[in-house]
Image: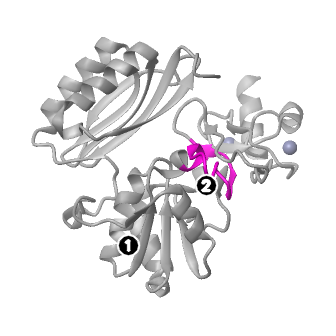
């Protein structure tokens, strides 16, 4: 793929107070439909969070329309070339939060409290210091295919589980430098804000997330191991463009390095697992023997 690719994938967010998110959602859905965009957009009183695919002309028009709105004037788009749509449909929804940390009445707005922002070069330099704690702010199935070298990757399946996990596991780390990162930066705005409010003294976040880190011409994704999980049909994208690039995921059957992330073919399971082509050919696309047995029975 190159810049001549006919499609673009946009990833963007903006924390900004919206007075009437429901009305804005309806209006915004019409705009996306008109432009033929596909993807997922969440809108809440705290802002907008979206990832869409469309033709170059459509995504350009969309960016111009959003940027022309004073509330989103400084919104940043991460843009990837693509050969076609990477989403099967369009969903534009009004929600309570654009990223659900589920703090209820203790909800926090990153415009009020958040960690200090680091550029990719600053993040890399700080990561190399002693006694820093690099915290992956994503779910376990995301960090499994790739994460920063030495990062703590919490075993959580949902962002809502972070507050409890942090209280149970990081209580002793309140005086350490904490460096948080996520895919595009949106989750860290809240996560780092939560850490600050919990009494952590030295909290930082990677501005623009792994995606921006991978594109930075100076750091070129160095010190990121594996690939970056994305929530579309691509599953994962490259980050590290240096010679230190390596595969960290392993096939669940043979244990050899493999970044083939597939869904278990036994539909009621559908678990996402690493499975090399040789093992899949031999045993089928299943996460384990139980699902293989169930899947085979279903076919016969
Ligand atoms: Zn294998
Ligand atoms: Zn399974």
Please provide the residue range marked out in magenta: 213-229
Find numbered disc 2 in the image and state the secondary structure of the residue it sits on. helix
Q: So how many labels did they put on this image?
A: 2
Q: Check the picture and name the quadrant holding the N terminus.
A: top right
| Up/down of 110 relative to 37, above or below | below
Residue at x 47% of width, y 71% of height: 165
Q: Quadrant of residue 204?
A: bottom left
Q: On the rendered structure, is 25 left or right of 298?
A: left
Badge 1: how crowded within 10 Å, few (<14), some, or many (20+)? many
Q: Which residue shows up at 77% across the image and 38% down it?
A: 292
* Residue 87 image offset from top left, x and y in percent: 49, 24
Q: Nearer the viewer, residue 132 or 229?
A: 132
Which of 265/216 is in front? 216
Q: Residue at x 44, y 18 (%)?
A: 54
Is residue 152 something that shows in the picture?
no
Q: Quadrant of the C terminus?
A: top right
Residue 180, label in figure: none
Q: Name the spot of residue 130 as percent of width and height, x first.
A: 62, 81
For the rendered model, the colour scheme is one colour
Residue 225 lies in the magenta stretch: yes
Residue identified by numbered label 2? 143
Locate residue 77, reporting x and y percent: 40, 36
Q: Mark number for residue 195?
A: 1
Q: Nearer the viewer, residue 14 or 229?
A: 14
Q: Is ligand 2 less than 8 Å from the beta carbon at label 1? A: no
Q: Is residue 228 visible?
A: yes
Nearest the camera: 68 or 182?
Answer: 68
Residue farthest to the front, as pictured: 218
Q: Is residue 210 magenta?
A: no
């Amino acid at each position: 793929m190159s810049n001549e690719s006919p499609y673009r994938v946009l990833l963007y967010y903006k924390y900004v107070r919206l007075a009437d998110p429901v009305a804005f959602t309806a209006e915004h859905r019409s705009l996306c439909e008109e432009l033929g965009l596909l993807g997922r957009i969440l809108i809440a009183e705290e802002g907008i969070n979206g990832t869409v695919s469309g033709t170059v002309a459509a995504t350009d028009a969309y960016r111009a329309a959003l940027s022309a709105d004073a509330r989103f004037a400084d919104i940043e788009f991460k843009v990837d070339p693509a050969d076609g749509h990477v989403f099967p449909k369009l969903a534009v929804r009004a929600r309570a939060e654009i990223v659900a940390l589920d703090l209820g009445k203790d909800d926090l707005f990153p415009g009020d409290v958040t960690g200090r922002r680091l550029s990719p070069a600053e993040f890399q330099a700080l990561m190399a210091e002693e006694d820093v704690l690099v915290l992956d702010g994503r779910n376990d199935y995301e960090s499994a295919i790739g994460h920063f070298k030495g990062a703590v990757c919490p075993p959580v399946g949902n962002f809502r589980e972070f507050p409890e996990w942090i209280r149970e596991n990081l209580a002793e780390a309140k005086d350490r430098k904490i460096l948080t990162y996520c895919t595009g930066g949106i989750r860290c705005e809240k996560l780092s804000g939560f850490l600050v409010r919990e009494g952590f003294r030295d909290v930082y976040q990677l501005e623009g997330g792994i995606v921006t880190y991978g594109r930075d011409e100076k750091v070129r994704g160095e010190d990121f191991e594996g690939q970056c999980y994305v929530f579309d049909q691509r599953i994962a994208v490259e980050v590290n463009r240096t010679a230190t690039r390596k595969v960290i995921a392993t096939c669940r059957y043979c244990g050899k390095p493999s970044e083939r992330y597939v869904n278990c073919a036994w539909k009621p399971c559908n678990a996402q697992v690493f499975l090399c082509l040789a093992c899949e050919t031999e045993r089928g696309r299943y996460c384990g023997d139980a699902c293989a047995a169930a899947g085979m029975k279903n076919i016969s």
